[in-house]
Image: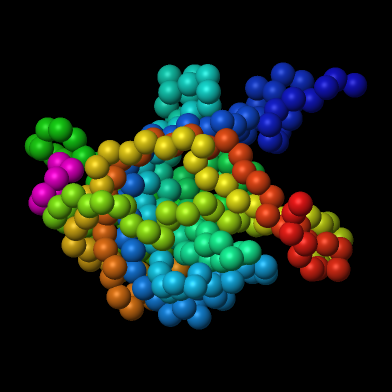
Amino acid sequence: MPELNGFLFPRTETGRATLIPRPPWQYSGDLLTVEYRTDPAKVRALLPEPLELAPEDPGAVALIWADWQSCSSSREELLDPIRSQYKEAFVVVRCSFGGVTYSRCVYIWVDKDFAIGRGLHQGYPKKLGSMWQTRPHPFSQAAPQIGPGGVFGASLAAGDRRLAEVVLTLREESETNGFVNGHPMAHHRVLPAIAGGGDAYAELISSGASSFEAGPAWSGDVDLKLFESPTEELADLHVEEIIGGYYRQVGVIWDGGNTLARQTADGSWVPAN
């Protein structure tokens, strides 16, 4: 029997057909972030055991659009752009475990299958969607500049319905790019049981960037709208108060994480040693 190779399915003798290469994964991209407050009970409803609400500002939410170019260490994907370029929009809240505050992605939409594959490994709950955002450019004929007065729009749709849209008008440089997505991520990695209910495997993991670079962060004025959908629940995180809007260009390397807790056969959670 041949030895099957590849980081994720499909695994073949050569490994060439695998959906994603092995980490580390490298990202360069433009992030448009909107932070707002919603009912903390709505956030709590999205936090499975053993997570709890963050002790400070528990209703804070970040809705982030990202226009990415990504690759493995070989960088070969950059010469075949369909393998490196993708867009996503994701919703981040904060949570607590073991007295530590974490960020957690509760919803995320992407437009490429390899991004979904990465999410399976990282614990991101990725689904297919349609995301668009205004791109900056040094020449202003058909693009805004990253600076005072730059106006950026973004939209999110899934299942043939628009879920969100935003207009961000930059005003000034900011010391931060917001605070909701500023912690290590706490995600569940699960595999449902093949027979009956429950999960055959479940663990709570923590991960974050192993390397991070960023340009100046800019803040500005935000006009955000969320829309109802029969197959999505983003609008349940209704906007009670806008905290701020931000734009930043970043570079990230992701290279694994750590197990925080594991679920036992009786459904309880045991902290990892």
Q: How is the image coloured?
A: rainbow
- Predominant SS of the magenta segment: loop
Q: Which of 155 and 21 is in front in this view?
A: 21
Residue lying at 21% horizontally and 40% vertically, measured from the top left: 136
> Residue at the spot x=23%, y=66% of the render?
223
Give the percent coordinates (x, y) of residue 79: 43, 19
Task: Specify whether 60 is left or right of 136.
Answer: right
Read off the magenta span.
145-153
Give the residue drawn at x 53%, y 23%: 73
Q: Does the magenta stretch include residue 83?
A: no
Q: Residue at point 68% right, 31% down?
A: 7
Query: Quarter holding the N terminus?
Result: top right
What percent of the width, then of the height, locates residue 44? 54, 75
Residue 188 x, y percent position in the rendering: 65, 57
Q: In this view, does 96 lie to the left or right of 218?
A: right
Viewer-proximal residue among 25 and 114: 25
